[in-house]
Image (cartoon, rainbow, N blue to C red):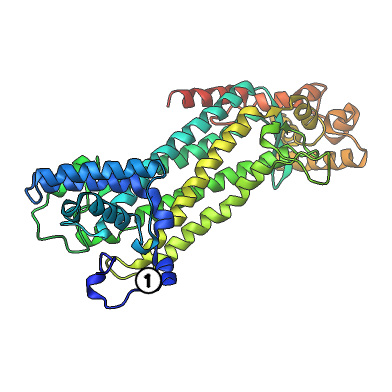
């Protein structure tokens, strides 16, 4: 007799290397808890509908729980020739409880079974990702609250642009993560749908109750179309997209961490716990954790592209290609979870070098826009003020000074309306405090921003 659940139709057994290629047990064993959960719900419903006996149902439940317990204790042998976690469990169940185990699959296909597992898995993991994002956001807020008055250079084109509050800068990532969290939260309603009972593609002739299994598994809704139920992988694509975009945001933050911690900037010092050294250069302290996060965006984005390409030419309903939906998702989830935890640790333990930041903004031209605004307040049209300041910057560069060092006589030669108060006006901390528009970098505006966050 064939050992394959589908072996009755076949007269030959596949060779071992074909089994290996066909099998998914190496990675879909990660679904075992969800598979057992779904099977218990299915067996309960079958008994309630009179399709199997209460005695069979009780044996099935006990057998499934015993199998799961053995798996957790590394006492369960998994067989590649049985392809996947579903058939491995079913085979083991029949071996343990006999014919009762063979009745579990009544009114169900592996197509709706694996879809159920994946919906349960994705819902649980997305919920955890939301929690991890929130935790990281809390760390960002703590750093921001401590650094409202810390002034740093803001950049455009990676060139010094205007002085800003360090708190304002780092809170930018809070809001990126807030959008990421919102996307994950919104996706739950498209994940939280039960496909169980759709069977292979057309439903079943047994009088099953799909609403009961939906309730038992705490799904928010169920698929209205059985073919859609077993062929839908939109929620996986959406989850991969949301993971990829979150990783892109972490990568942008990582790039800043890498630059800030360099000797050239020295804006922050990373904890030794989140840094590594060199095997040849004894002095090195490398931001490897940030670099790894930046590098891992390639793999998460690759998983998204791979899934889109897998689906693009598939006819309805289920196709074996869909077995490729798991490894990429599992890896992407694992990658983002790890990246969020690492980043939270880096931010919690980094030291902000306030004096270096202060020195930096006093030794650049990031206050040039303030000088132009000063002239505008004196009645000079902005475009004319822009040209005047541009010439003053050029003079300063040629004379190896900054705007705070320009003699008043030189200022008044550039425009007679410039007075001695210009030096106080151009101090970086005053440049920042004058930013009063909603959502700006001014200290009062940043405090209002933090109030909005606290009240969310």
Residue 73 x, y percent position in the rendering: 40, 41
Quadrant into which the N terminus falls: bottom left
| 418 vs 398: above or below | above
User: Which residue in the rendered view is the most extreme toward the left?
Assistant: 50
**Pick the front one: 3 or 190:** 3
| 437 vs 319: above or below | above
**Pick the front one: 84 or 441:** 84
| 18 vs 404: above or below | below
Q: Residue at x 31, y 71 (%)?
A: 315
Residue 187 visible from this viewpoint? no
Label 1 Cα crowd, 10 Å radius (few <14 / some 14-19 / many 20+): few
Image-based side of 108 in relation to 284, left or right: left
Residue 183 x, y percent position in the rendering: 41, 44
- Where residue 172 sits, quadrant-wise, is top right
User: Which residue in the rendered view is the most extreme toward the bottom?
Assistant: 11
Q: Residue at x 72, y 36 (%)?
A: 369
**Pick the front one: 414 or 153:** 153
Q: Residue at x 75, y 36 (%)?
A: 366
Image-based side of 403 in relation to 219, left or right: right
Instruction: Quickly name the residue at label 1.
Output: 313
Q: Secondary structure at mark 1?
A: loop
Quadrant into which the C terminus falls: top left
Residue 115 visible from this viewpoint? yes
Total count of labels: 1
- Where residue 65 sits, quadrant-wise, is top left
Residue 287 x, y percent position in the rendering: 70, 41
Residue 296 x, y percent position in the rendering: 58, 51
Q: Residue at x 72, y 40 (%)?
A: 276
């Amino acid at each position: 007799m064939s050992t394959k659940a589908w072996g009755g139709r076949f007269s030959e057994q596949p060779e071992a290397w074909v089994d290996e290629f066909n099998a998914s047990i190496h990675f879909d064993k990660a679904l075992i808890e969800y598979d057992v959960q779904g099977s218990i719900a299915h067996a309960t419903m079958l008994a309630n509908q009179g399709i199997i006996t209460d005695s069979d149902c009780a044996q099935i439940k006990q057998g499934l729980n015993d199998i799961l317990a053995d798996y957790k204790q590394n006492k369960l042998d998994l067989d590649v020739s049985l392809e996947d976690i579903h058939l491995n469990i079913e085979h083991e169940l029949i071996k343990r409880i006999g014919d009762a185990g063979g009745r579990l699959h009544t009114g169900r296909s592996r197509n709706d079974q694996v879809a159920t597992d994946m919906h349960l898995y994705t819902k649980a993991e997305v919920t955890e990702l939301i929690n991890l994002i929130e935790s990281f956001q809390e760390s960002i807020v703590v750093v921001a609250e401590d650094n409202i008055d810390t002034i740093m250079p803001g950049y455009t084109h990676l060139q010094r642009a205007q002085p800003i509050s360090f708190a304002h800068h780092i809170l930018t990532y809070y809001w990126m993560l807030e959008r990421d969290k919102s996307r994950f939260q919104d996706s739950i309603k498209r994940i939280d749908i039960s496909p169980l009972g759709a069977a292979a593609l057309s439903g079943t002739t047994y009088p099953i109750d799909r609403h009961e299994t939906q309730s038992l598994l705490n799904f928010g809704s169920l698929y209205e179309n059985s073919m859609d139920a077993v062929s839908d992988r939109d929620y996986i694509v959406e989850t991969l997209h949301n993971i990829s975009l979150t990783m892109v945001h972490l990568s942008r933050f990582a790039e800043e961490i890498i630059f800030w911690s360099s000797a050239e900037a020295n804006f922050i010092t990373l904890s030794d716990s989140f840094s590594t050294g060199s095997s040849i250069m004894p002095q090195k302290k490398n931001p490897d954790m940030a670099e790894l996060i930046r590098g891992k965006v390639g793999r998460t984005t690759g998983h998204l592209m791979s899934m889109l390409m897998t689906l693009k030419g598939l006819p309805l309903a289920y196709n074996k290609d869909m077995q490729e939906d798991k490894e990429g998702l599992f890896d992407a989830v694992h990658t983002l979870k790890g990246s969020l935890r690492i980043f939270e640790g880096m931010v919690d333990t980094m030291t902000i070098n306030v004096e270096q930041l202060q020195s930096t903004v006093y030794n650049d031209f990031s206050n040039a826009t303030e000088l132009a605004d000063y002239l505008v307040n004196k009645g000079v049209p902005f475009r004319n003020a822009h040209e005047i300041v541009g010439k003053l910057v050029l003079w300063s560069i040629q004379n190896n000074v900054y705007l705070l060092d320009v003699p008043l006589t030189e200022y008044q030669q550039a425009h007679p309306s410039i007075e001695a108060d210009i030096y106080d006006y151009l101090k970086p901390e005053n440049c920042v405090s004058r930013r009063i528009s909603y959502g700006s970098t001014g200290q009062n505006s940043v405090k209002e921003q933090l109030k909005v966050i606290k009240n969310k």
